[in-house]
Amino acid sequence: MHHITLDSETDFDGWRKAARALALGDVKPSDVSWRVTGDAPELFEPAAAPLEPPHGTFNVPAKFVELAEVAILHRNPERFALLYRLLYRLRIHHDVLELATDPDVAEVAAMAKAVRRDEHKMHAFVRFREIGREHKSHFVAWFEPEHHIVELAAPFFARRFADMPWSILTPDVCAHWDGHAVSITPGVAKSEAPTADRLEETWRSYYASIFNPARLKVQATSKEMPRKYWRNLPEASLINPLKPPKANDTASEMARKQADDIEMLREEAADCRACHLYKDATQTVFGEGRQTARIMLVGEQPGDKEDIAGKPFVGPAGQMLDRALEEAGIDRRTVYVTNAVKHFKFVPRGKIRLHQKPNTPEIKACRQWYERELAAIKPELVVAMGATAAQSVFGKITPINKNRGRPIDLDDGTRALVTVHPSYLLRLPDAEAKAREYRRFVQDLKIAADVLRKSAHAA
């Protein structure tokens, strides 16, 4: 096994050098693990096999190099492995990039597109604030990129604002311009970002005078300018107060309209500060899946792997769930998967983050997102996996063993099924007990599949 450590999250040159040596050595993608300096190694991981000096050469399309340079800036933790797998295949199949339906090609292209979109958002939504006066002034902005795009986007600002010294602060890295060159320094906390400057009130007054509330389309605006960016734009604070609600819109009707689009909800949840858990978590981990899904799976909270990846059920518990769903005859691609609590709650132990069970106030604070996901998805069946999920779904503490194994009607007409969380199975120390409980878990999922089959037949 070859364990490759890159210097940074954006170390394309390091990845390219290592990938070339691995490919020339005919090292299979499955025999390589990738990490970034500072990542904790796996427990009891064997010493890395040294890379042999590369001999010979091979060519890949220039299109791949251009694509990889951008896609590697994506925040997907599997991007290094994915790009190497595609490179390994390109040595033999030179035209694989032309196959738009190829899973690897499609995923890399989607990653590159997401990075470019994020770069565009940074160009559009960065707002500088003036610190100091006259010749001593410096312009500072705060931005929270979705991907590792700061170094990619910085040259635009150097060209656009060449005559003023500026700094763009982000949680990842910071970019600075002194009038001559861009420099990159480590990221900072948002508390170090500047507050409103002396020109901001003037700008807001002007914006209010030209803003026409009747022409505002909130959903279209949110797609072009996701809500996560609103708090950093001085003019955005004026939009809601200036936009008059429709006369016949009740509070519940307005909430329902907000819940119509999952992507809109995901953007809004990225800024959730309803409880303290956001302070230590890497990011909000929102639900994922088809908006037309007939089954909605609800877990407890994201774990360490999910917190880093930003997706639910991608770690060991997710692998256990995938296997059980397959045995139960349910295709995970057809369901919507989410968690009762959207931020990772943990206790640090050195470099390890130990999972900690959410408490009732935290579950209640996050329940608004479950309710709005439920309104958007409109599933026929909700599967609550674990006590935390059951408490969120039913709105009260609900024992698992007492209620599992049978569909339960909810007040809104949706049916619910209670079962254990996949991580419970992973914690069982006894092999026989683990096998027994896994069979029960699969049986619960088969009940879910049977409910849908009966529903389809009835229709």
Image (cartoon, rainbow, N blue to C red):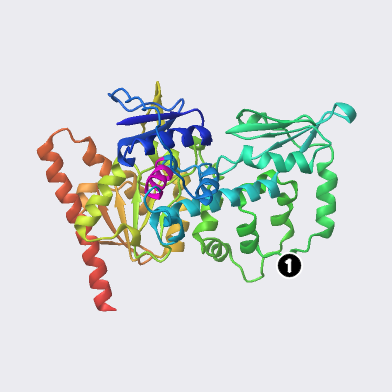
In the picture as drawn, the residue positioned furthest to the bottom comes out as 459
Q: Where the N terminus falls, by quadrant?
A: top left
**Residue 83 x %, y %:** 43, 44
Chief SS of the magenta region: helix
Residue 281 appears in view: no
Q: Where the C terminus falls, by quadrant?
A: bottom left
Vertically, is 338 above or below 77? below
Q: Which residue is mark 1?
A: 215
Q: Is residue 76 left or right of residue 178?
A: left
Q: Secondary structure at mark 1?
A: helix
**Residue 233 x %, y %:** 71, 46
In the picture as drawn, the residue positioned furthest to the right comes out as 134
Q: Quadrant of residue 250?
A: bottom right
| Residue found 31% across the figure and 40% down from its top | 28
Looking at the rendered structure, the kind of residue marked 1 is Arg
Residue 115 appears in view: yes
**Residue 122 x %, y %:** 66, 46
Q: Is residue 282 left or right of residue 408?
A: right
Vertically, is 134 above or below 64? above
Instruction: Name the one closer to the observer, 72 or 416.
Output: 72
Is 290 in the magenta? no
Q: Which residues are magenta?
A: 81-90
Instruction: Name the one closer to the observer, 103 or 292.
Output: 103
